Image: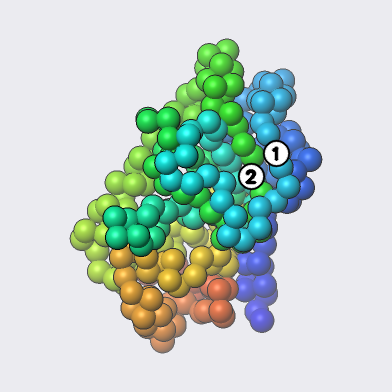
Amino acid sequence: MSSNIAESKQVGNFCTHDYRVNCSDCRLNSICLPIALEAQDIERLDKIIQRSKPLHKGEHVHRENEPFTSVYAVRSGCLKAYKITGDGKEQVTGFHFPGELFGVDGIAKNSHMVSAKALETSAICEIPFKRLEELSTKLPSLQRHFFRLMSQEIAEDQQLITLLSKSSAEQRVAALLISISSRSAKLKLSATAFRLPMSRTDIGNYLGLTVETVSRIFSRFQKAEMLRVENKEICILQIEEMQQLAGL
């Protein structure tokens, strides 16, 4: 296995699964909620955060229609968000990586619009929303940063709608790979070598493609020497070309 591919194994487990690590010591504090806070204020945020032992693959953080009480931050691993459609099928609506918030879908109606499930061993921080609201009134920088993160999620949802309505299958897959590449770079890891925690089925479901189409596109990218794939390990060989294909 190449060194780049081996390096990509770090991405899913970037932050320790140890639930005893606090915000000040967490390696993600430069991209998560604490980024907006001074050292003494980080301690105030840390006091309201609830941490538990890691989730196992397949375990849920919350389910669709459950009462909304908290927002969450991914410490390690990866989770997927999904809805159950009218005919009982699963529709993947997003993936959550280390340093990212999720669960904000429940704010509007006080119940979650989607379910969130671990794709691999994952650790999360639970932030009770009422306590976050109270702290935000005392720390305006925290409130502004939280609103910024919510705005970013809305923008990403709009990008997905545009992607699914106008782009070709190749563009959709390229856009997802570039999105994961960018997330890896934010963690100060390789932007070209990473692991895909989701299955080809989940990728197809999310992008509105069949699993066969996803597999063909990965093979096509490999033949064009744009990509190297070893099971779930990905190495983007021509990142500028991939970005152009994704329209980014």
Q: Quadrant of the N terminus?
A: bottom right
Identified at 44% across, 57% down, the residue is 179
Of 84 and 230, the residue lying toward us: 84
Q: Is residue 90 left or right of residue 11?
A: left
Give the image quarter of residue 190. Answer: bottom right
Q: Which mark is residue 193?
A: none
Q: Position of residue 209 (x, y in %)?
A: 31, 70
In screen coordinates, is 140 left or right of 163?
right
Dot 1: element: strand
Label 1 crowd (10 A; few <14 / some 14-19 / many >=20): some
- Above or below residue 104? Residue 160 is below
Image quadrant in which you'd find residue 82: bottom left
| Mark 2 or mark 1: whose residue is earlier in sequence | 1
**Residue designated by label 1:** 51
Task: Report the residue at 62% width, 25% height from top.
Answer: 37
Residue at coordinates 32% horizontally, 56% vertically from top-left? 85
Pinpoint residue 238: horizontal percent, then vertical percent. 44, 72
**Three-letter residue code for mark 1:** Arg
Give whichever of 69, 126 is nearer the camera.
69
Q: Which residue is mark 2?
A: 124
Q: Is residue 139 left or right of residue 81?
A: right
Mark 2–mark 1 CB contact (< 8 Å)? yes
Which kind of residue does numbered mark 2 sit on? Answer: Ile
Q: Quadrant of the C terminus?
A: bottom left
